[in-house]
Amino acid sequence: MRSDRARRTPSTRRRWWLTGFVATTALLLAACQQGLPQSSLEPAGPRAERINDLSTIVFWMAGVVFVLVEGAIIFITIRYRRRRREERAPVQIHGNNRLEILWTVIPALLLAGLAFPTVAAIFDLSRRPPGGDVLEVTVIGHQWWWEFRYPDLNIVTANELVVPVDTPVHLSLESAETPGGIAEFTADGQPVTQNAIPVIHSFWVPRLAGKQDLVPGKVETLTIEADETGTFLGQCTEYCGTSHANMRKRVIVETEQGFQEWVSRMQAPPAEPEPGSLAAQGAEFFQNFGTGSCLACHGVEPGAGGTVGPNLAHLASRGTFGAGLFETNRENLQRWLDDPRAMKPGVVMPDYNLTEEQIEAIAEYLLTLE
Amino acid sequence: MAIAQPLPRGSVFRRPTATTGFVSWLTTVDHKRIGILYGVTAFAFFLLGGLEALLIRWQLATPEGQLLDADVYNQLFTMHGITMIFLVVMPLSSAFFNYLVPLMIGARDVAFPRLNAFSYWIFLLGGLFLYSSWFLGGAPDGGWFGYAPLSSQMPGNNLDFYAVGLQIVGVASLVSAVNFIVTIFNERAPGMSLMRMPVFVWMTLVVSFLLLFALPVIAIALFQLAGDRILGTHFFDAAAGGDPILWQHMFWIFGHPEVYILILPAMGIVSEILPTFSRKPLFGYPAVVFAGAAIGFMGWGVWAHHMFTSGLGPVANSAFALSTMFIAVPTGIKIFNWLGTMWGGAIRFTTPMLMSIGFVAMFVIGGLSGVTHSIVPADWQQHDTYYIVAHFHYVLFGGAIFGLFGGAYYWFPKFTGRTYSEPLGHLHFWLMLIGFNLTFAPMHLLGLEGMPRRIYTYGEGLGFDVWNMVSTIGAFTIAASVLVFMWNVVRSLSRGEKAPPDPWDGRTLEWTIPSPPPHYNFAEVPQVRARDDFWHRKYTEDGSGRVQPVVAGAATEEAEEGHAEEEHAEEEHLDIHMPDPSYWPLVAASGLPFIGYGLIYDWIWAVPGAVLLLFGLFGWSLEPVAEEGH
């Protein structure tokens, strides 16, 4: 009777474990959703692919070790559990040199085996891509947005990096803020300088490459490359202050032709608003809204950089603003002009107490900047 | 001068005499009481850090969470990290060091009892100093790692509290590290050679050396940070020729050994629990000790794996990739030896044993994900994502916290003289195990799917929703398990059965004395003849490893002896001279927060601080022993 039960218990348990295992696997498979825009598990370029391949090897090896060790724990705890009222005195084993050497050497050899592809990948991926067909882009990290400069093309844009497909893009990464900041006025009219701090940010678009920090005073490099067109999301991954979570970006990969069209659009000045229109009035407010000028911080000339805020020459051609946070549309722009910090905490741009009329006109003007 | 004269009665230098009541706790130098103070205080901070974690998880449960704003969230995740590392796991380990090391090596106290009290009071006051920032304009919000130049240039006092507060807390650990090194080298009972010491004592020794060498590095870095913030230096200011990467090197040269400072004590605890409840000696004791020491050495050569994305270049990245891979080897040795300990044993599933098995099972996961970080290109994807958050919680919660809870249950009868409730203990374990895995396992996936750390909000459409909700549910499950633990403690303190001296059939010296131990620990200093000395007093083994009780019923006799000893303790052992209580550690320690406020606000506050500190140190050095003739 007793031995019967003893025989049945382990098999019942085994069934439990099996059920649990199947359920967990099903859950995990369900978890690996496809089509995630920011997932490192879905590489869309050779560099992210290389990393993913290497990771896959490691995950499988770790997976095997995991199953063996956890399996051993479960086996040992079941097999060697003390039964009720059993007073067994186990054999006192103090150690076993041969075994211990074995489980020192085997992991060491496994790890040594991993070292070769790792070091090879480190050097390969750190190298500047060979050949002349490389797009150079300078990335400047700001609190909390991204400035993209194309030095060979005289383009300056923000938060949306447009690149051609199947072309390595060599990024020079810097972190800098324009000194001086901007003047903001307190309730009683006192000017307060609002300054962004040049801090460390990190550039990461998981589907295209690994990440690289942007360090003040240094120029770091990173190469990204996409082998399919589309929009790939990324965001800052080095904690950089209040709105770190809101420092997002997107890489838009175009066909070669689409990219050339984009370049010529970006190099042309934006269309002048029709005289007498609401947009023209907005342009005037943009230059002078009574207590200041938007131009103090924002360029509207193509290729102009070096100011406190993003270049707005072609703002309306960008799908989002506020570092990838908000869709570029009338409602969002008006909300932003009304109170930027309500939409993005800590942002340098203050609430300028613009009138309803000014907000409507400026938003109208901004939407013409294509 | 009066110094040479015997001091008159009633002078400020007279030593306090209270042995019970509130004052006795303020003036105690008894390592056991200090251990309890450490434990209770650290547990209180554990509840605060846990509360912070619950707020964080509530905020992240859904996309665009509205519970917290960005600034409060940033303070919460910073304080959660600082609290759990500096105010929970380190002092909880310290609680076990304090209470157990003298008992395990057969000593009556630590080498410097007043220094021990001093380090506790600094820890308490330093922790309160850090927490006072919540009421003084906001807590530190630069992350526990405080990367410059964000930390050196952010306006407000938040990060001043970081720079100064950690410095204060660091003094506590540094002082106690010296204390334990001297204690372990000098205070061992006769016959207790180094290779007969319990593994827990070994790990205490390794951790103390790590602290001794790591804390000065962070102390210098924090001085530089305070200099940049308060005095106008430019160590980390690139525009003035400083280097932000300098902070990272300094921080992680401290920070990586710190990781082992957090995990090795728990490894030591588990190495005591597994043999007891398997009724077998630790498998490969020398290997486990050497692996611990090897981790202690190798831990200094892996710091830059925290910096693979900061642009060190391929050569440095490769070197640190290799060193990081190979630190997995000694860690693996420990795991296999623990499995070897259980193999063939007679395993009793008490709560401490469950916690220890949980420790091994969870630590394996944290160790394996750690190996994946050493694959530098993979780390370029994983770094600063939730994958890392998952990894180090498997090490520090699945590892350290499970181990520390295991220790709390294991020695609960020794600490309190009461037995705890096993059913409640089991409930705690299973709830915590399930809650822990619900919370942190999904984070692996979240990180790989692109969710960065330290973000107070995330958008919809990124695929982060489901697993964040699961994780939040898990966090509240953990909270429930901690409530079960607290109920168990409260219930057992008032209604638990009286604990015998040796409730587990233990192996080490602390089980030879009554529960709780008398203030002098050992009536007679024990003579140690073997590793696991107490076990060998109870059992012999023949050549093939079969166990025989020394005399039939020897264990019971020992126990009765213990009871008898307890009853007659007070009369019989009044002649044992123990260190006298003292006010001065508390007085001296209380100067430090004032100096801290002085640095942050106005130097005038530093004056009373300096007076208290100096007065305290003078009083300390001048106070006599209480009774003449000892």
Image (cartoon, coloured by chain):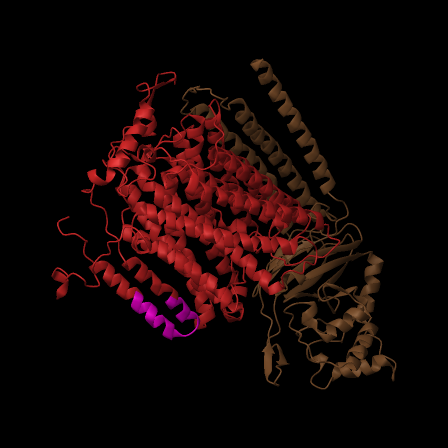
Chain colours: A brown, B red
Between B183 and A321, the one lying in front of the other is B183
Counting the numbered discs, the total is 0
Q: Is residue B540 left or right of residue A349?
A: left
Q: Quadrant of residue B417?
A: top left
> In the rendered structure, does residue A350 fall within the stretch colored magenta?
no
Q: Position of residue A150 (x, y in %)?
A: 72, 65
Q: Is residue B261 above or below residue B191?
A: below
- Seen at 56% across and 37% down, the residue is B430
- Seen at 65% across and 61% down, the residue is A172
Residue A9 is at least partly visible in this image: yes
Q: Is residue B574 left or right of residue A29?
A: left
Q: Position of residue A183 (x, y in %)?
A: 62, 80
Q: Position of residue A335 (x, y in %)?
A: 75, 72
Q: Is residue B106 above or below residue B65?
A: above
Q: Quadrant of residue A330?
A: bottom right
Question: Please, what is the dominant secondary structure of the magenta stretch?
Answer: helix
Quarter of the picture containing the C terminus of chain A is bottom right
Q: Is residue B543 left or right of residue A235?
A: left
Quarter of the picture containing the N terminus of chain A is top right
Between A176 and A264, the one lying in front of the other is A176
Q: Is residue A17 above or below residue B446?
A: above
What segment carries the magenta color?
B594-612
Between B66 and A272, the one lying in front of the other is B66
Residue A303 is at least partly visible in this image: no
Q: Position of residue B450 (x, y in %)?
A: 68, 51
> In the rendered structure, does residue B603 fall within the stretch colored magenta?
yes
